[in-house]
Image (cartoon, rainbow, N blue to C red):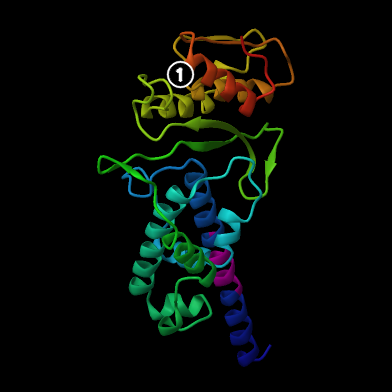
Amino acid sequence: MALAEIRRNLLETRLHLVLDMDAAASRKAQRQLYIQYQARLSPRSPLFQWPQNFGLLAAQVGLDTVLFGGKETYPSNNEYDRLFLKQLVKRIEQAIEACTDEQAASLDTDKQDLTVDDAILERYMRLVSMPETPSIMGTRVPSPLYVHHYFPISTAKNHHDILGPCESVTFRQEGTAISQGTTGLTTWEASLRLAAHVVASPYLWERSDACILELGSGAGFLGLVCARLFDTLPHTGAQLYLTDLEGQVLDRLHETAQLSTSTSCY
């Protein structure tokens, strides 16, 4: 084999590797943003994990479709989308500024030609032109949101186009920690962390005689995560009991159960 042909083959191999890496970085960034967007996590929160600069640039193409292209039964609202897109555009602009010539070349462009994706920018500009949420005594009260928390599990009955095998819990969450005189209509950080521990610990819920009782279930996030886990099991002997005080919190718990699971909850 001639030296020129060897060099050409090496260059083609390197190109394929770079393209594969770009595609992997794009998919990872899109999944990362999708999960947090669906959870309606504040993009200004220190808990929000933004993709690295290169991944964010690689993920731009098709990101608008990934985030907003699906027909959701319980979509976000303009208030959250405006805040999310404001931070997303800002992060993309910072990524463009930090991008090297070599990174731009791997994206098949020149650095001076890098811009925020047209679809993302147009959507943000439309939202900016819309009226904002009315304020009460100078304070803008966030509107309630439907929240979707996804968690991967190999035995899931559902296969998400973006996330793969996973389950999810959907519920309506108030915009403030204390709403209608109670703290039971929102989800606290401790509940999210405990749910993550339960999902990662199958020995807690895989037994056919598993029985879970939750006292003070509130909006029902943690309990309904357990219900979704039970749904993935081949047996039906597991039992789940969620409790709270009668009234608006218990009504919200019933609503969450209807939104999120086919498992019977008592």
> Vertically, is 102 above or below 40?
below
Question: Around disc 1, counting alpha carbons within 10 Å, would you say few (fewer than 14), some (14 to 19), or many (20 or more)?
Answer: many
x and y, in percent, of residue 130 in the image = 45, 58
Give the number of callouts: 1
x and y, in percent, of residue 204 in the image = 54, 16
Relative placement, left or right, of 128 versus 8 is left
Residue at the image point whose x is 51% and y is 31% from the top: 172
Q: Nearer the viewer, residue 261 or 174?
A: 174
Quarter assignment of residue 233: top right
> Vertically, is 69 above or below 207?
below
x and y, in percent, of residue 259 in the image = 62, 28
Residue at the image point whose x is 53% and y is 49% from the top: 34
Residue at the image point whose x is 37% and y is 69% from the top: 93
> Vertically, is 141 above or below 253?
below
Magenta stretch, overall SS: helix
Relative placement, left or right, of 247 versus 232 is left
Quarter assignment of residue 209: top right
Amino acid type of the residue that numbered disc 1 sits on in the rendered structure = Gly
Q: Nearer the viewer, residue 30 or 83?
A: 83
- The span picked out in magenta is 16-24
Relative placement, left or right, of 216 versus 161 is left
Q: Any magenta on residue 185?
A: no
x and y, in percent, of residue 129 in the image = 43, 63
Residue at the image point whose x is 65% and y is 35% from the top: 154
Q: Could you tell me which quadrant the C terminus lies in?
A: top right
Q: Helix, strand or loop at disc 1?
A: loop
Q: Nearer the viewer, residue 181 or 107?
A: 181
> Vertically, is 229 above or below 158?
above
Residue assigned mark 1: 218
